[in-house]
Image (cartoon, helix red, strand yellow):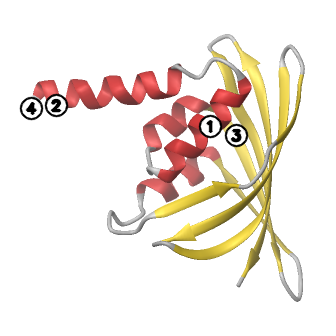
Amino acid sequence: MFKFILVIFSSVTSFATLAQNPEEVVNAFFEALNSKDHEALEILTVHDMKIHSLKLGDSVTISSQTAKEFIEGIKSMPEEVTIFEKIIDSDSIISEHLAQFTLPYEFYVNGKLSHRGTNVMTLLKTKSGWKVSYVADTRESF
């Protein structure tokens, strides 16, 4: 049992810590999201990350989440629910200590398209490497 826990912990840790540049962090973030790996998401984000979402429709509504709320939401998803955020394209601006990505996406729940939109992610280069500090997204449901 101890070996199993050690293997799981080391794979989570290496998965998130192998990301050394902003592109790798963004890719690791979505791999962690799609596998509902809340431990990797904690490693890949700053502790006070913020998420703002614009739900598009007849009217536009804005919601926000803290890193803690986002990760708790991932943790609370039932095991039988699968999620997959498919990134359609990527555009970025990267400087020495700051990176920003624009990422059109489609989001699937249990294999069915739930919504689509655009993510804008900001990353900061910290003492421990690149971390996601902010996410804004649009959500257009069907």
Kindly identify which residue carries mark 4.
1
Give the mark nearer the N terminus: 4 vs 3: 4
Q: Are marks 1 and 3 in contact (CB under 8 Å)?
A: no
Q: CA distance from mark 4 to mark 2?
A: 5 Å
Q: Are marks 4 and 1 in contact (CB under 8 Å)?
A: no
What amino acid is labelled 3 in the image?
Met
Q: Position of residue 87 (x, y in %)?
A: 69, 53
Q: State which quarter of the image contains the C terminus.
A: bottom right
Kindly identify which residue carries mark 1.
27
Under tag 4, what secondary structure? Answer: loop
Residue at (51%, 59%) from the top-left corner? 73
Q: Which mark is residue 4?
A: 2
What amino acid is labelled 4 in the image?
Met
Q: Residue furthest front?
A: 88
Camera-side mark, 2 or 1: 1
Residue 96 visible:
yes
Near-viewer residue (13 or 21): 21
Q: CA distance from mark 2 to mark 3?
A: 31 Å
Q: Position of residue 52 (x, y in %)?
A: 78, 56
Left or right, 21 with respect to 77, comes to right
Kindly identify which residue carries mark 3.
49
Q: Position of residue 90 (x, y in %)?
A: 80, 44
Q: CA distance from mark 2 to mark 1?
A: 26 Å
Residue at (28%, 31%) from the top-left corner? 8
